[in-house]
Image (spheres, rainbow, N blue to C red):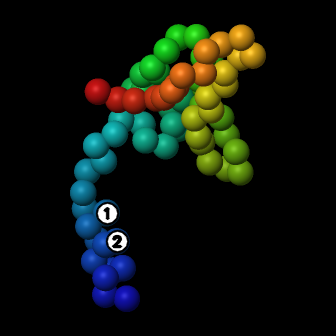
Amino acid sequence: MITSLILSVLMTASPNLLENPSFDRGLEGWLKSTHTIRMEAIREDGRTAAKITVGPTDEIGFPLLYQE
């Protein structure tokens, strides 16, 4: 109980290092690793998430979203 309380306080007090971590502003602040795949922010079950779509003729590789 005490450990979870301390963790909760630390998480609340520390600044978030990511810009737009919840994707509420779409992909603003995020970069993608390749331009051949489709990336978008979607709403699912009341929460926003990033969706990566690879077309049938695209090379899959290792697509990712990142921030510098």
Instruction: Classify 10 Å Cα crowding around label 1: few (below 14), some (14-19), many (20 and above).
Output: few
35 on left or right of 53: left
Q: Quadrant of residue 51?
A: top right
Q: How many marks?
A: 2
Residue 2 percent across, percent down from the top left: 31, 87
Residue 44 percent across, percent down from the top left: 70, 45
Residue lying furthest bottom in this view?
Answer: 1
Q: Is residue 23 visible?
A: yes
Question: Tag 1, which secondary structure?
Answer: helix
Q: Quadrant of residue 28?
A: top left
Q: Quadrant of the C terminus?
A: top left
Residue in front for this viewpoint, 40 or 46 = 40
Residue in front for this viewpoint, 52 or 46 = 52
Type of amino acid under label 1: Thr
Instruction: Classify 10 Å Cα crowding around label 2: few (below 14), some (14-19), many (20 and above).
Output: few
| Residue identified by numbered label 2 | 8
2 on left or right of 58: left
Tell me the residue at 42%/26% (across/down). 30
34 on left or right of 13: right
Q: Is residue 27 visible?
A: no
Whether the residues at callouts 1 and 2 have beta carbons within 8 Å, the answer is yes
Q: Is residue 12 above or below residue 49?
A: below
Question: Tag 2, which secondary structure?
Answer: helix
Tell me the residue at 71%/51% (across/down). 45
| Residue identified by numbered label 1 | 12
Tell me the residue at 59%/40% (across/down). 49
Residue 32 percent across, percent down from the top left: 46, 21
Give the Cα distance between marks 1 and 2.
Answer: 6 Å
Type of amino acid under label 2: Ser
Q: Quadrant of residue 42?
A: top right
